[in-house]
Image (cartoon, helix red, strand yellow):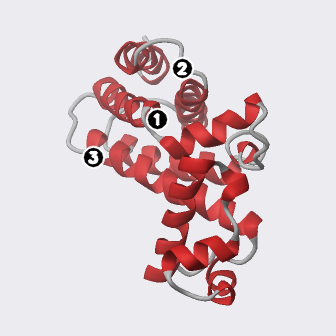
Amino acid sequence: MARVTVLRTRIVEAAGALTGAEGWGAVTMGRLAAEVGVSRQTVYNEVGGKEALAEAMVLHELDRFLAAVDAEMSGQDDVVEAVRRAANAVLTMAADDPLLRAVLSSTHGAGTDLLPLLTTHSAALLDTAAAVIRGHLEPYDLALPAERLEVGLDMVVRLVLSHVMQPRQSPERTADDIAWVAGAVLRPT
């Protein structure tokens, strides 16, 4: 895993802002260097090539979303309410996130290479999200065998990600629906 420095974070955030404003095609190492005030070689030294930058950008954005999940799930007495609150936070953030919109716009001819990081090459994203949520589910007495809990956890993460990518209704309504499904899976009768 790449080391995280203040400079690396600045570069990744600048790349995210530029991608959100102008698209991934507008991001060059030279432009990032000028934006951050360092040499192009320094940008390469900190983040590697453009593919590594893309992954770092998506994982940095994921950290922002997971901080919201962490905040919403912490201290909740009811697992279903915790899932509802976390899903609502993620879906609300996603609705207004310019970087996420830029990534998803590649399905409409924007020509980015970022979409696979959320779809076909999303293992790091799914694993990281599942680990955060798993940590919040541990205090609840869910009375599920470990393998069933993992299936339920995977289902919740993938369901939220699906609605992030293709929202159909308000974040609140979707979060209510996800909580209902999570309740059926995590608290079977």
Residue 162 is left or right of residue 41, and the answer is left
Say if mark 1 contacts mark 2, CB within 8 Å.
Answer: yes
Instruction: Say whether disc 1 or disc 2 marks the residue closer to the N-terminus.
Output: 1
| Residue denoted by label 2 | 167
Residue under the point 45% across and 30% down: 95
Query: How packed is label 3: few (under 14 Cα within 10 Å), some, or many (20 or more)?
Result: some
Label 3: element kind: helix
Could you tell me how far apart the alpha carbons at marks 3 and 1 are, in whole angstroms?
16 Å
In this rendering, the answer to whether 151 lies above or below 102 is above
In front: mark 3 or mark 1?
Answer: 1
Label 2: element kind: loop
Quadrant where the N terminus sits is bottom right
Instruction: Say whether disc 3 or disc 1 marks the residue closer to the N-terminus.
Output: 3
Residue 21 is left or right of residue 118, and the answer is left
Say if mark 3 contacts mark 2, CB within 8 Å.
Answer: no
| Residue denoted by label 1 | 94
Residue 140 seen: yes
Instruction: Say whether disc 3 or disc 2 marks the residue closer to the N-terminus.
Output: 3
Residue under the point 48% across and 30% down: 144
Of the numbered discs in the image, which one, if any, rests on residue 71? 3
Q: What residue type is labelled 2?
A: Pro
- Whole-percent x and y of residue 146? 55, 39
Choose between 49 and 131: the one closer to the eye: 49
Query: How packed is label 2: few (under 14 Cα within 10 Å), some, or many (20 or more)?
Result: some
Residue under the point 43% across and 16% down: 174
In this rendering, the answer to whether 78 lies above or below 129 is above
Choose between 9 and 142: the one closer to the eye: 9
Question: Quarter of the image holding residue 182?
Answer: top left
Say if mark 3 contacts mark 1, CB within 8 Å.
Answer: no
In this rendering, the answer to whether 137 lies above or below 91 is below
Could you tell me how far apart the alpha carbons at marks 1 and 2 are, in whole angstroms?
9 Å
Query: How packed is label 1: few (under 14 Cα within 10 Å), some, or many (20 or more)?
Result: many
